[in-house]
Image: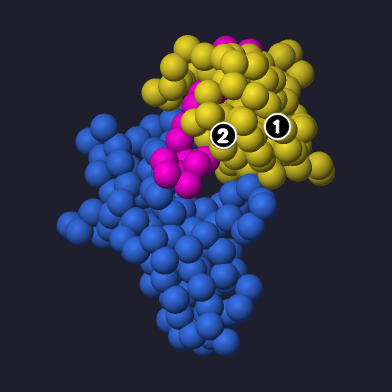
Chain colours: A yellow, B blue
Amino acid sequence: KAGVTQTPRYLIKTRGQQVTLSCSPISGHRSVSWYQQTPGQGLQFLFEYFSETQRNKGNFPGRFSGRQFSNSRSEMNVSTLELGDSALYLCASSLAGGREDTQYFGPGTRLTVL
Amino acid sequence: AQSVTQLGSHVSVSEGALVLLRCNYSSSVPPYLFWYVQYPNQGLQLLLKYTSAATLVKGINGFEAEFKKSETSFHLTKPSAHMSDAAEYFCAVSESGGYQKVTFGIGTKLQVIP
């Protein structure tokens, strides 16, 4: 069974631009979570989607948004990029996000903002 | 509110020595706790999780962790370190038990000295 895939793996943008990252969960998984990882702040929860609905959101500004499609693939968008948005963005999927599930992570998309 | 504190951002052990990575949590409800490992340029992999079934949890690669409510701790141990254990380790907590909103610690980088 294929794992969680994220595209692109690397991205370079300039301040003020917007970016869209994509995540394809493991087949059959309907819960997708997004995390931002930086050296200073560590891993921070962005949001979680289940069946095309955002169930939870972390403490990030409205510039960060996401969506999930009917096939469970998810995208996250960051508008008006800032230097501080440079990070590794990780996507993770699980069957339903429940306590009996196991969450599997993708390799991440490394975003550099110049 | 839930939070996790990992004591020691860097830990060095000799090959064959005991590995002990410390994690303390704060939670307003009985927590669900996780340990993840991250190898360079990769996503996170679940090592083990505590879901209140047993206080001593055995995970993959010979790791285990013990939940101690009185000490609000969930330290990760391995009797004998292997070179391949060199990685970054993250402790995480979820009050819901699921993956809808997970809070991670800052991470501990483990160095294994031959």
| Kind of residue at disc 1 | Ile
Q: Main secondary structure of the magenta part?
A: strand
Q: Which residue is tagged 1?
A: A12
Question: SS for tag 1?
Answer: strand
Disc sitting over residue A86 in the figure:
2
Magenta residues (range):
A37-54
Q: Nearer the viewer, residue B81 or B112?
A: B112
**Where does residue B86 sit, x and y in percent of width and height?**
57, 70
**Where does residue B19 sit, x and y in percent of width and height?**
44, 75
Task: For label 1, count other residues whose C-alpha is less than 10 Å away and answer few (under 14), some (14-19) or many (20+).
Answer: few
Q: Nearer the viewer, residue A87 or B82?
A: A87
Look at 52% across and 60% down and name the residue there. B88
| Kind of residue at disc 2 | Ser
First of labels 2, 1 by sequence position: 1
Whole-Å distance between the Cαs marked 2 and 1? 9 Å
Look at 47% across and 12% down and name the residue there. A62
Can residue A17 be found in the magenta stretch?
A: no
Task: For label 2, count other residues whose C-alpha is less than 10 Å away and answer few (under 14), some (14-19) or many (20+).
Answer: some
Answer left or right for B105 relative to A10.
left
Instruction: Please give the chain letter of the residue carrying mark 2.
Output: A
Question: SS for tag 2?
Answer: loop
Answer left or right for A4 relative to B99.
right
Answer left or right for B76 relative to A86.
left
Q: Nearer the viewer, residue A105 or A40?
A: A40
Depicted B20 relative to depicted B37: above or below: below
Depicted A38 relative to depicted A61: above or below: below
Q: Quadrant of the N terminus of chain B?
A: top left
